[in-house]
Image (cartoon, grey):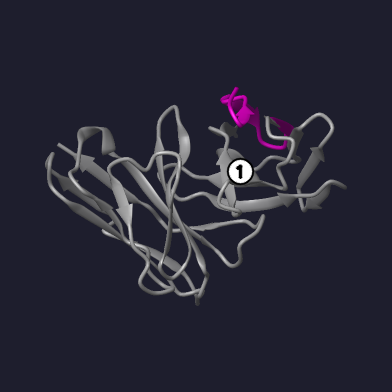
Amino acid sequence: RKEVEQDPGPFNVPEGATVAFNCTYSNSASQSFFWYRQDCRKEPKLLMSVYSSGNEDGRFTAQLNRASQYISLLIRDSKLSDSATYLCVVNTRNSNSGYALNFGKGTSLLVTP
Amino acid sequence: DAEITQSPRHKITETGRQVTLACHQTWNHNNMFWYRQDLGHGLRLIHYSYGVQDTNKGEVSDGYSVSRSNTEDLPLTLESAASSQTSVYFCASSPEPGPYEQYFGPGTRLTVT
């Protein structure tokens, strides 16, 4: 089983729509969780961290369910500029007493006029 | 402004040649990482370092090496380039050991012919 699994999409939505992405992770000892955004042929950029209580940043809301090992990202009022690939990322302690980021393969979003 | 840079941004090399990709960050971060990104695989960790003179193998380290002689730089060397190492390479850094987010450089697109 993959460490982090996401629906690859693509999700095609009209401007103004609400869209939700889901992600599951396999390691129950994972300690921190993030959503990154990656535009075509560019580097991943941190979109937001995900906290147990859920957190919101403008039009973006992230939720974490540790019991189900499930992370979600909700985008409201989609903009054309939201078109990108969204990476679910889980930070887990590794054998070297450090931490390693495990990346999902990403969910592709295309917002259309 | 502090940043993380990679060079070259694009490189074409021949099978069997030694290639070194540079990564330089001015955040004074102790932790630095190298990833490769290929279609169908997402981002995979090659090597990482938690400080000067510290290096560790990641998930896909065969055929690669790194050295850390100062805080700012973590060069990645392909000892004898193979066509399977054609990929996009991203360097990243984070401030402290721990479950923190990482910040990525712009990437190097390497083609091995």
Measured as percent of width and height from the top left, residue B43 is found at 47, 40
**Is residue A8 shown in magenta?**
yes
Q: In this rendering, would B17 be left or right of B43?
A: left
Look at 61% across and 53% down and name the residue there.
A97
Measured as percent of width and height from the top left, residue B62 is found at 32, 40
Q: Amino acid at mark 1?
A: Asp
Q: Is residue B88 above or below residue A17?
A: below
Bounds of the magenta segment: A1-23
- As helix, strand or loop, the secondary structure at mark 1 comes to helix
Look at 19% across and 39% down and name the residue there.
B112
**Is residue B90 shown in magenta?**
no
Residue B55, by quadrant, is bottom left
Residue nearer the viewer, B53 or A58: B53
Measured as percent of width and height from the top left, residue A68 is found at 81, 29
Residue A40, by quadrant, is top left
Q: In this rendering, would A54 be left or right of A21?
A: right
Q: In this rendering, would A10 be left or right of B21?
A: right
Give the residue pinned by disc 1: A82
State the quadrant of the C terminus of chain A.
top right
Residue B63, by quadrant, is top left
Q: Is residue B53 above or below residue B12?
A: below
Look at 40% across and 68% down and name the residue there.
B53
Q: In this rendering, would B52 be left or right of B15?
A: right
